[in-house]
Amino acid sequence: MNQTSQFTHSFKLSVAVLVLWFFWDTLLGVTLHGLHIVVEILELLLEHLLESLFHVEGHTAQMYTAWIGFSLLVALTLFAYRHTRRMLANKFPTKDHFSTWSRQWAREHWFILALPTLVLVLSESLF
């Protein structure tokens, strides 16, 4: 990676950090609202599917949908946990590997780490 592309990468990452730093509440709200709409649509489709396939009442289909959704959430959480542990174990076999990597990353990307603090200090001193 040459120096220009490394600077461009660091700049883009710095801009992303600044956007997340100042607009995290808006981004989080929009993201969670979109996710909630998708989940509601899937629940509605599953309820209608259960009602038409198994000829159950609406309330019963809602209960089945809730239990199916809870089971999927538990399964997804376990999958993500196991996958993350396996990925981290492959990347960092020991704690020394992680310590070395984190120190090297901090030396190479010090600007990204210092930028939010700099912005905070400057904003406090201006107002």
Image (spheres, rainbow, N blue to C red):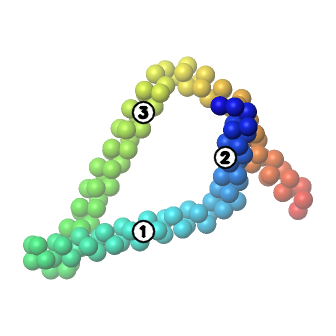
Compute the Cα span from label 1 to label 3.
28 Å
- Pick the residue in front: 69 or 12: 12
Q: Report the residue marked by disc 1.
A: 36
Amino acid type for the residue under numbered disc 2: Leu
Compute the Cα span from label 2 to label 1.
28 Å
Instruction: Looking at the image, tell me whether mark 3 or mark 2 is earlier in sequence order.
Output: 2
* Location of residue 21 (image quadrant): bottom right
Q: Which mark is residue 87?
A: 3
The structure residue drawn at horizontal position 49% and vertical position 25%, both measured from the top left corner, is 92
Foreground mark, 2 or 1?
2
Q: Report the residue marked by disc 2.
A: 13
Q: Secondary structure at mark 3?
A: helix
Q: Is residue 22 left or right of residue 74?
A: right
Q: Is residue 96 left or right of residue 115?
A: left
Q: Is residue 106 left or right of residue 117?
A: left
Which x, y percent locates residue 67? 24, 62
Count up the numbered dots: 3
Q: Quadrant of the C terminus?
A: bottom right
Which x, y percent locates residue 42? 31, 69
Q: Secondary structure at mark 2?
A: helix
Which x, y percent locates residue 9? 67, 42
Compute the Cα span from label 3 to label 2.
23 Å
Amino acid type for the residue under numbered disc 3: Met
Q: Are marks 2 and 1 in contact (CB under 8 Å)?
A: no
Which x, y percent locates residue 118? 81, 47
Q: Secondary structure at mark 1?
A: helix
Q: Are marks 3 and 2 in contact (CB under 8 Å)?
A: no
Q: Are marks 1 and 3 in contact (CB under 8 Å)?
A: no
Would you place residue 38 above or below residue 70 in this image? below
How crowded is the residue under tag 2: few (<14 C-alpha within 10 Å), some, or many (20+)? Answer: some
The structure residue drawn at horizontal position 15% and vertical position 80%, both measured from the top left corner, is 57
Q: Is residue 73 left or right of residue 15?
A: left
